[in-house]
Image (cartoon, grey):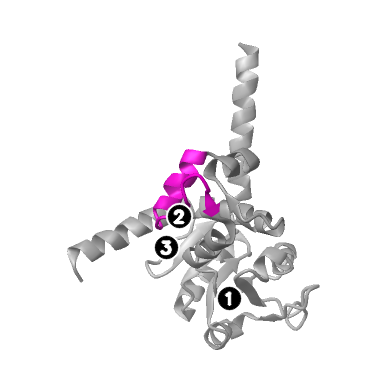
Amino acid sequence: MSESHNRLSSDRDVISELTTGRLSVYLRCLTYLESLQQKTVSSHEMAQRFHLNSAQIRKDLACFGEFGTRGVGYNVSQLKEHLIRELGIDRTRNVIIVGAGNLGMALADYRGFNGNGFQVAALIDIDPNKVGRASRSGIPVLAYSEMPRVVRERQVEIAIIAVTADAAQEVYDSLAAAGVNAVLNFAPVQLRLQSTVKLKSVDLRINLESLSFYLKSAEDGIAE
């Protein structure tokens, strides 16, 4: 593999980490504009309408090619389809949720996880009292021992960890062993990573503590 190819791959990894969140926002904006049957939109109009930064929009999109026509703007439908391809959601990716408690059940029924590129194939749990049940939308709860089979047969690419902190590492390691390549972790714990598995963590308490810090800083400023 050439040095230039390696450099391009590395650059793309950096771009993805920095911009995919914003690309998802742009996709939502374009989907809304398309629902209004709007044909074109400028970066300035997008920024004004959706409270974004027009220079950032142009910079982000330039990372993936040349888009838009001077004086006209971007073709809404074409740009939307391009972002769908860049985000890899132009095909359905199967997902499993490990943990069929209140959080896992809520995530299974969340419309954002069923459709638009993602499909929850199953909930997984170790509790025999939960196995055999289903979420409100009909997602089945299967035994933890069946996880490798489900991953293999349903070609699961993404898993969501919705278990307690003390069980999360074992679950993560088992998912890696089963061949899952990407994990979204809701357990409030720092996991030991495996190089073959991409991990994203959502720690609600960290976000709340960050907000608390902001409030305290404001309070301290008022007190002074």
Q: Which residue is mark 2?
A: 67
Region in magenta: 54-74
Q: Which residue is mark 1?
A: 92
Q: Where's residue 18, x and y in %?
A: 43, 50
Q: Secondary structure at mark 3?
A: loop
Looking at the image, residue 221 lies above or below residue 22? above
Q: Tag 3: residue type?
A: Leu
Identity of the residue furthest to the right in this view: 136
50 horizontally vs 87: left or right: right
Q: Where's residue 186, x and y in %?
A: 60, 59
Is residue 58 among what the camera can see?
yes
Report how far apart the C-alphas of labels 2 and 3 lie in the structure.
37 Å
Neighbours of disc 2 within 10 Å: few (<14), some (14-19), many (20+): some
Residue beneath the point at 44% across and 49% down:
60
Residue beneath the point at 53% across and 44% down:
43
Q: Which residue is mark 3?
A: 193
**Of label 2 and label 3, which has the lower sequence position?**
2
Count of marks, rendered view: 3
**Of label 3 and label 1, which has the lower sequence position?**
1
Report how far apart the C-alphas of labels 1 and 2 lie in the structure.
26 Å
Q: Tag 2: residue type?
A: Phe
Image quarter for residue 147?
bottom right
State which mark lies toward you, 1 or 2: 2
| Residue 71 part of the magenta-drawn span | yes
Is residue 202 among what the camera can see?
no
130 horizontally vs 151: left or right: right
Q: Where's residue 16, x and y in %?
A: 42, 56
Residue 107 vs residue 69, the one in the foreground: 69
Residue beneath the point at 77% across and 78% down:
138
